[in-house]
Image (cartoon, rainbow, N blue to C red):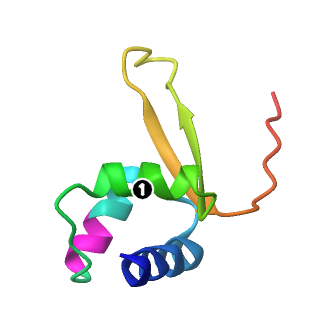
Amino acid sequence: MKELKKLITERVNKLAPIKAMELIVDLISSGLDHPDLPSLLEEMVKEKLIAEIEYCPPDMDYRLKSIYFSAGTLITVKN
């Protein structure tokens, strides 16, 4: 499991920022399959191996979306 998390971290670092679905498709097409990738990614966020932003687009306030970044990424929201 540690090796899988390391490979996922490397992919996020290379592709960041990346949308959640794009990341999952990339991981599966790269052969990095896991029975429950969303839960594994959530675990990695809790362990601070990767960073995640959750957001709701204004025209789809019923839908929560995610973007993943490299751990330690500084994010500033400007309006």
The structure residue drawn at horizontal position 75% and vertical position 60%, both measured from the top left corner, is 73
- Coordinates of residue 72 in the picture (x, y in percent): 76, 62
Residue type, numbered disc 1: Leu
The residue sitting at the front extreme is 1
- Coordinates of residue 34 in the picture (x, y in percent): 21, 67
- Coordinates of residue 65 in the picture (x, y in percent): 43, 36
- Coordinates of residue 7 in the picture (x, y in percent): 43, 82
Q: Mark 1 points at which residue?
A: 41
| 28 magenta-colored | yes
Residue 19 seen anywhere in this rendered image of the structure: no
- Identify the image quadrant of the C terminus: top right
Q: Quadrant of residue 71?
A: bottom right
- The reply, left or right, for residue 36 in relation to residue 42 is left
**Magenta part of the chain:** 25-29
Q: Who is closer to the viewer here, 41 or 67?
A: 41
- Identify the image quadrant of the N terminus: bottom left
Residue 43 seen anywhere in this rendered image of the structure: yes
Q: Who is closer to the viewer here, 39 or 70?
A: 39
Q: Who is closer to the viewer here, 62 or 34?
A: 34
- Compared with residue 34, is residue 60 higher up or lower down, i.e. above or below? above
| 58 magenta-colored | no
The structure residue drawn at horizontal position 43% and vertical position 78%, both measured from the top left corner, is 2
- Compared with residue 10, is residue 77 higher up or lower down, i.e. above or below? above
- Compared with residue 69, is residue 67 higher up or lower down, i.e. above or below? above
- The reply, left or right, for residue 48 in relation to residue 54 is right
Main SS category, magenta section = helix
The structure residue drawn at horizontal position 37% and vertical position 23%, both measured from the top left corner, is 63
Label 1's element?
Answer: helix
